[in-house]
Amino acid sequence: MAATSGFAAVLAIASLLCLTIAPTRGALQVGFYKGKCNRTDVEGTVKSIVAARFARDRTIVPALLRLHFHDCFVRGCDASILIDGSGTEKTAPPNLSVRGYDLIDQAKTQLERACPGVVSCADIIAIATRDAVVLVHASKNLPGASLNASQAIAAFRAKGLSASYTVLLLGAHTVGITHCSFIRNRLYNYNGTDPAFVAMLRKRCPQTSAVDNSVFLDNGTPSTVDNSYYKQLLAKRGVLKVDQNLAMDAATNGTVKSLASGSLSFPSLFGNAMVKMGSIQVLTGAQGQIRKSCRAVNK
């Protein structure tokens, strides 16, 4: 119950990552909002908000990637994850640690003042995620951290995404973090993982600690969108079970190796994968609703 033009904004991800993607739905295209918000530059407005947040909090990049991913994977890219209330997507256990809502609210508020009822919440998520990735680069339906590679592939395939797209989209972990509570149950069952790395994780996440410490998912270059994540997996330094399994499973091992070696370009392919994910069950025209507030459906 959200976007009418989510795919248009997601296409812009490809544009800024130097990709060439043709629009697949009529009038939807990169720059969709140009001239449609009175004299306000819609994409420029969102970009300035993201840049200001990024300047003081670089973790907004993985936060927005996760927000976008979790929105798209349940009912499609419709910004339904933003809706407040009991029983909503926002209150589902996998989404309790999702953040970035305030940034989306800030952008929506500014744009509603400039042109009420024009810019969809789903497009704001997509534009903000794109801009965050560019900055760092110069529920039950969600795939969980405890899945193995085969289970993750099945979850992604149910959304029309291949095994290769599974590997690429999990590459978002190149700038991601997790917390000890998500990995503590496997701290003493890290099969196929570098023993020295396991020792480091156990030190970071002691069994008796009352503090839920954060852990980088890419311990090579955790603040850069690059192929270090895949190199870490081949070095048996995957933090999550699903990550390490990508390097071990026959269906994904080849792609992991190609991305780690650089024979496949991760940044450009990741942009393509984000565009593909961003087109999942998008609502267009009369199918959706441009909400006045991203936190509630219009009445």
Image (cartoon, grey):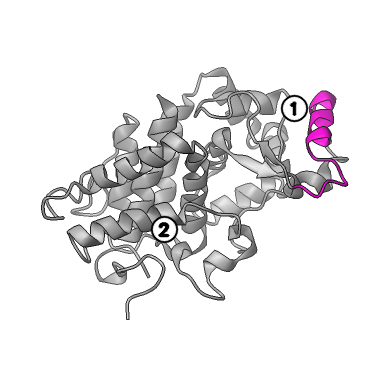
Residue 227's tag is none
Q: Is residue 272 visible?
A: no
Q: Marks 1 and 2: CB-CB under 8 Å?
A: no
The picture places residue 217, in percent across and down from the top left corner, at 64, 35
Q: Which residues are magenta?
A: 193-211
Report how far apart the C-alphas of labels 1 and 2 lie in the structure.
Answer: 33 Å
| Side of 272 relative to 201 (left or right) | left
- Foreground residue, 72 or 167? 72
Task: Residue 124: give x, y in percent of width and height.
Answer: 33, 53
Spot occupied by residue 256 in the image (x, y as percentages of width and height)? 61, 29
Outermost residue to the front = 56
Camera sees residue 290: yes
Quarter assignment of residue 284: bottom left
* Residue name at image x 30 percent, y 60 percent: 109
Instruction: Judge whether residue 33 is colored magenta.
Output: no
Residue at numbered disc 1:
236
Question: Where does the N terminus fall, quadrant-wise?
Answer: bottom left
The amino acid marked with disc number 1 is Lys
For the point 30% across and 41% down, which residue is it? 48
Residue 119 higher or lower than 297, as above or below: above
Is residue 195 highlighted in magenta?
yes
Label 1 SS? loop
Q: Which quarter of the figure has residue 178?
A: top right
